[in-house]
Image (tube, coloured by chain):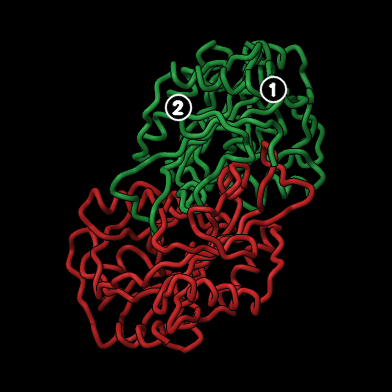
Chain colours: A red, B green
Amino acid sequence: MVEHPFVWLNGALLPAAEARIDPADRGFTLADGLFETLRATQGAPRHVGLHLARLRHGAAQLGIPVAFTEATLLAACTELLAANALNEAVLRLTLTRGPGLRGLAPPPAVTPTLLITAAGFPPVPDTVTAIICRTTRRNEFSPLAAIKSLNYLDNIIARREAATRHAEDAILLNTQQNIAEATAANLFLLSNGTWRTPLIRDGALPGILRARLLAAGLVQEARITEADLFSADSICLGNTLSVRSVSSVDGVEININKVAANKLREVQQD
Amino acid sequence: MVEHPFVWLNGALLPAAEARIDPADRGFTLADGLFETLRATQGAPRHVGLHLARLRHGAAQLGIPVAFTEATLLAACTELLAANALNEAVLRLTLTRGPGLRGLAPPPAVTPTLLITAAGFPPVPDTVTAIICRTTRRNEFSPLAAIKSLNYLDNIIARREAATRHAEDAILLNTQQNIAEATAANLFLLSNGTWRTPLIRDGALPGILRARLLAAGLVQEARITEADLFSADSICLGNTLSVRSVSSVDGVEININKVAANKLREVQQD
């Protein structure tokens, strides 16, 4: 099941139907890997350097070698987009520790798997309804909270809870009940004219858009509580692909500030 | 990379080299799945009913359909063992939500992936050196703590820390700093003649051996702290495949009680 016919796997562009992940791949058996989601415009990926730096940082923490350069990655992405006749697109780069024998111990010689897939740019609504997730929490005690790893099932559980509660996304608390992030986006909260976003040590994933907004001086890091959500002047969920204004949390209407959201959106769309 | 030439994938026995996991499989992209590790003796899997019940319970929580019966599973395992000429063996059953499009939302029609692999029974040492993991914690607030899901990277991080600190396994604390389990085994602690094991609500995986030991009245559930480890009469790590006496924790020698460990081992080897 693929949206587009070609994928890039371990150095080769090939039809998706021919691309084979080894059943012994530790990405499949143990979620032993990482990924990045990149936005592409005009047939080329955006902010490749920032995504690669985050991937390298996470891979180093996990001890997964990264054997490719930014130039290689850029060429692979561009080739893949061209093969799929995509201009405005989303790329996903998945890096795993590769095949291994049974058990947790990594193989003595690691042959990482690198998969890149492409999809058309999805429709992005301006607003989103959210709940505060009650079925699971973000584990700020794990280094994985700061790594975009394949361990995504807590986020899927949260998204399933959102669907059950007739909302589109879920906001995750950490184990201390502070706000961490949404299921696939960082949270930005406007109050007194200032956008704030949860701390990395509170379980926020170091998102690329988040980093760019901080660098641009448009957002500040802060501890954010449940109560803050309901007294906010506005809330946005933002990632590489979109900035959406939260229109409700747990069914309670939240004010939408289009002008303030557009300030974040200008950076996201760059 | 496989130890044995045949695997069982989605209803068919086939050479491992021909078995293909779709790059869009959500088990690979999002760790959206579960697994079971079964012991096999004399060419047949043991305690299939207990493993299937746990798998069904986890799958139901995640909303992944389980379309096979115990009889089907038993037949598949037996056929796989025979094809690989294995008698004393380890089987791994992996169930994922199957292929999906980009993003967290599950596909409207789910086609789960079911993979069964077999390996020769590994050598099992009687003892193990352990550390208390300081780099990550078990998240007892997540339902995943009680599901044998594919999200195994925290355990890999803990095992890597153990290797760095010259130990063989790591004992994980939960976010409240109580003992949860080891990286791939439950913990059993002997004091005053009684074996105790951490509570499920403290982040212990509901292990099959653990359940069998509780049912046999050989073990009791209790909160266990770091201090308890160092005042224990003995400690064991146990799972479906083995019971090992912990010979040291953080370099501090722990007493080994072979007679008491053998009581647990008798159940494990049944």
Q: Earlier in the sequence, mark 2 or mark 1?
A: 2
Number of the front mark, 2 or 1: 2
Up/down of A30 relative to A225, above or below? above
Image quarter where the C terminus of chain B lies is top right
- Residue B8 at what x, y percent from top left? 54, 30
Q: Which residue is mark 2?
A: B54
Chain for mark 2?
B
Q: Residue at x 65, y 47 (%)?
A: B156
Please tell me if label 2 and label 1 are on a single chain: yes
Asked if the residues shown at circle 2 and circle 1 are in contact, with their CB atoms under 8 angstroms apart, the answer is no
Q: Toward the viewer: A174 or B208?
A: B208
Neighbours of disc 1 within 10 Å: few (<14), some (14-19), many (20+): many
- Residue A127: image quadrant is bottom left
**Residue type, label 2:** Arg
Give left or right: position of A261 versus A45: left
Up/down of A43 relative to B49, above or below? below
Q: Which residue is mark 1?
A: B243
- Residue B74 at what x, y percent from top left? 50, 17
Q: CA distance from mark 2 to mark 1?
A: 21 Å
- Residue A83 at what x, y percent from top left? 49, 72
Up/down of A86 relative to B70, above or below? below
Q: Toward the viewer: A28 or A15?
A: A15
Neighbours of disc 2 within 10 Å: few (<14), some (14-19), many (20+): many
Chain for mark 1?
B
Q: Residue at x 39, y 84 (%)?
A: A269
- Residue A239 at what x, y percent from top left? 41, 72
Image quarter where the N terminus of chain B lies is top right
Up/down of B83 relative to B169, above or below? above
- Residue A245: image quadrant is bottom left
Q: Residue at x 67, y 32 (%)?
A: B5
